[in-house]
Image: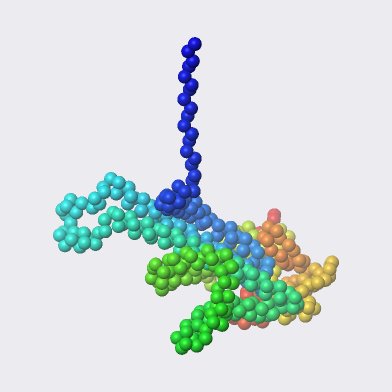
Amino acid sequence: MNESAPAPQPAPLARHDPIPEATAHPHRVRDRTDELELFISGLLAFALLAVPGYLFDAWARSSLHTEGMYFQMLWFGFSISVGMCYVLALALIIHLTVRGYWIGLIGLRSHFPDGIDWGRLPRMGAVTRAFLQARDGGLDGSIERADRLATMLFSTTLLAVQTLAGTLVLAVLTLGVSMVIGALSGGADHVAMLALCTVLAAMLALAVTPGILEKIVARRQARGRPHERPQRLLQGMLAALQRVPLLRLMQTMQLTMQSNLRSRSFMAAYLFAVLVAMLLAAVQVMASLKFSLFNRYQIVTEAAVEHGMLSAHYESMRSAHDQLLPYPMIPSDTISGAQLRLFIPHRPQRDNPLARQHCTALPDARNEATGQQAANAAVECLSRLWLVKLDGTPVDLHDFVPMERRDLDMRGLVGYLPTRGLAPGRHDLELVWNAAGGERGAGRRRAFRIPFWYAPDP
């Protein structure tokens, strides 16, 4: 009886170990970095441009409710965060442009490997052709330079963002410690500011101490004197600084670029980028406070509209552009009812320092009363800060009541002025904050004029 031959067994597959393969081909990881740079830049570049708007809205709402160290903490966090977003977005857009140029050069090399064919440029003059040809590095040189520029730009951007993030964390921690010290000492801002200056001075001393110790060690070595003690102290400080994760992350990237590029030029460009980032938030705030940063209004000037009409005074006309203008306001520019509602916002950053001088019934301008007495104390205090007139006739603010307006995200005083007896037509509300103040400074005299037209219902 014939037996069939056994079926051939498949040869065992060789085991695939990815680790030796990756180790044997390190250039594969290098080749992927270009794609990763493009992916990260494309994902974040334009998305980051929308973030500062949300940060500004959050800061604008919160800053109206704070003063002193709390205000400084909010401002520093806002300015650093907005600067990081703008710098990172702008740098990534430039990086995308350079990478696009690099991709275009690679495509040209695949189709035209010889690069520029100078012989087929007959209309170019001989001098110009010779000049440009002598300085042409070919497609390979251009590709290498574009790749180098894109990588340097990407790394420098990340380094600047890490610096800003570290500065933000350090500033928040420092301000937090100062605020805790100020709260324990009775909530005095000057104590918190003194603590802040002390902490900043200590940190500055810590930053310059390694450089000073390095010079001491070098000087003692040159003179043949013992240097072991300052050297051990320097090594201990360096070891302590190495325990900070962010410093370790920044060190490799910064020293690599600083040692392979012109050190002074790199540090100047790097610090300039950080400084510009911190100034961008101030520009955004100024743009919100001003009607226009760049204008040529020579007739209808700012002084003219201050004595005319400002939309921030009318609730029906206010927009997001008026968010940082907590002005006294009325419902509309035309009034037809029997009562005119006037809302006077309370701004702690501006009112609290003045209240500490004028509101003697409130210790340190703190309203710790309860019930109706709390409302009466608030009205009594703020009425000392404001003077209100309707068509030149003084308005008694003691008839006003405290009000919280969630629609405006403000608190203040509200009063209802009777319009009976007013003639149809234009009338003017005049309000003065700190009438005895000077002409400059945060506590200067501030005057507001609100024209409106009375059109009674038939």
Asked where in the image residue 378 lies, by quadrant, the reply is: bottom right
**Image location (x, y in percent) of residue 255:** 46, 68
**Image location (x, y in percent) of residue 353:** 69, 77
**Image location (x, y in percent) of residue 109:** 29, 49
- The one of 201 and 93 positioned closer to us in this rendering: 201
Query: Which residue lies at the image location 49% right of the left edge and 61% below the top edge?
Result: 158
Q: Count numbered badges in the picture.
A: 0
Which residue sits furthest front? Answer: 1
Look at the image and tell me in which quarter the C terminus lies: bottom right
Q: Is residue 192 visible?
A: yes
- The one of 46 and 43 positioned closer to us in this rendering: 43
Query: Which residue lies at the image location 66% right of the left edge and 67% below the top edge?
Result: 64
The colour style of the image is rainbow
Judge whether 94 appears above or below 438 on screen.
Answer: above
Asked where in the image residue 165 lies, by quadrant, the reply is: bottom right
**Image location (x, y in percent) of residue 417:** 73, 65
Query: Which residue lies at the image location 53% right of the left edge and 80% below the top edge?
Result: 231
Which residue sits furthest top? Answer: 1
Query: Which residue lies at the image location 54% right of the left edge and 67% below the top edge?
Result: 247
Judge whether 263 appears above or below 110 on screen.
Answer: below
- The one of 325 and 280 positioned closer to us in this rendering: 280
Left-right relation of 371 to 167: right
